[in-house]
Image (cartoon, rainbow, N blue to C red):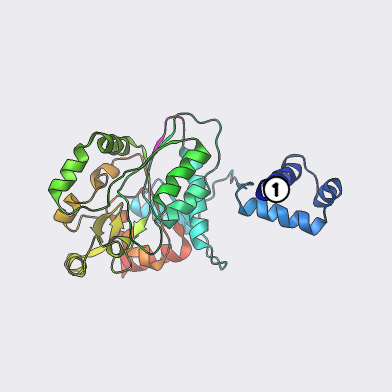
Amino acid sequence: MKNFKRQRLLVQIAKLYYEEGYGQERIAAVLNLSRPYVSKLLNAAREEGIVRIQVIDPLNIESSLEKEFRQRFGLLKAVIIPREEDGERLRHVGEAAARYLNEIIEDGSVIGTSWGGTIYECSKALIPRKDLNNVVSVQLCGGVSDVSQTVYDSPIADNFSMILGASSYMLPVPAVVDSREISEILRKDGNIAKVFQRGLDADIALFTAGTFGQRSALYRAGYLKDSDLLKLKQRGAVGDICSHVINIEGKICDTDLDDRTMAIPLESIKKKKYRIGVAQGFSKAKALCGALRGGIINVLITNEETAEKILTDLDG
């Protein structure tokens, strides 16, 4: 009950401030609160997602770095967040992805997503749209368990459902199975086949880039062993896209492993109208290089530090 009363107060103050145009002092007088407390509650309303602030750039100004990436890789769009010092890089990149999604989603859009912290931040920052109908979100790759940090597969689906009113579909299988035969059997299951088909039908693919090595979610989950890492490293692995392990040219590193990977085929992802790669951090740069070179991404959303590292790795 206490939490309900607090949330009701946050909504009331937010409506007075943002919809009615009341100043903080007037709100304080009306509700018999102190002005500093009103200010604190307004900040809380933004932090808890009750208030979402969207900045619309009518000029859609493109930075020189964004233009370089767009032209060099034939992208539809490059969104590169300027260098920042507040330590919220993951959140800012996720929010930028949510803003871009808001520009392209329309009635009937089918949005395929990977899992991971970056996509989770995007899902939290989605902009509510009451004008949309029949939006679908679907998971493009199987889940990962037994890792120290959650991959947010279920919360991502929940956020798309709650904020956009989307019909959300999870892919209830592991990211990698033990054999090609198991993969084929699972794909023939009626319910699983329906989810795969929705993923194939998606016109928007939203995914992050996985790092390669012992820090990767696939390794930490036990899907890759030390011997696998060594073999993949010898074959030039730089990371994964939707659990597909790729090299610096964006090509599959190991066809046997890929046959056991429970995800929408990489070639199918490359045919989608919007292929939005969202990632940040030096550990993701080489995987993004491969995704860009291989034409897997046609929309890049990252930050300045990562973009500069990508160019260094490509030109080095």
Q: Horizontal and vertical percent for residue 47?
A: 62, 54
Left or right, 129 with respect to 294, comes to right
Residue 249 seen in the current view = no
Residue 92 seen in the current view = yes
Classed neighbour count for the residue bearing mark 1: other residues with Cα under 10 Å, few (<14), some (14–19), many (≥20): many
The answer to if 11 sits in the magenta stretch is no
Question: 186 and 36: which one is in front?
Answer: 186
Q: Residue at x 16, y 57 (%)?
A: 254
Q: Amino acid at mark 1?
A: Leu
Q: Horizontal and vertical percent for residue 289?
A: 32, 60
Question: 23 and 47: which one is in front?
Answer: 47
| Quarter holding residue 213 | bottom left
Q: Secondary structure at mark 1?
A: helix
Where does label 1 land, which residue? 10
Main SS category, magenta section: loop
Quadrant of image for the C terminus = bottom left
Q: Residue at x 82, y 47 (%)?
A: 31
| Quarter holding residue 40 | bottom right
Q: Residue at x 44, y 57 (%)?
A: 302
Question: 220 and 146: which one is in front?
Answer: 146
- The residues colored magenta run 106-111
Question: 183 and 99: which one is in front?
Answer: 183
Q: Horizontal and vertical percent for residue 211?
A: 33, 63
The answer to if 110 sits in the magenta stretch is yes
Relative to 259, is 215 above or below? below
Left or right, 33 with respect to 117, comes to right
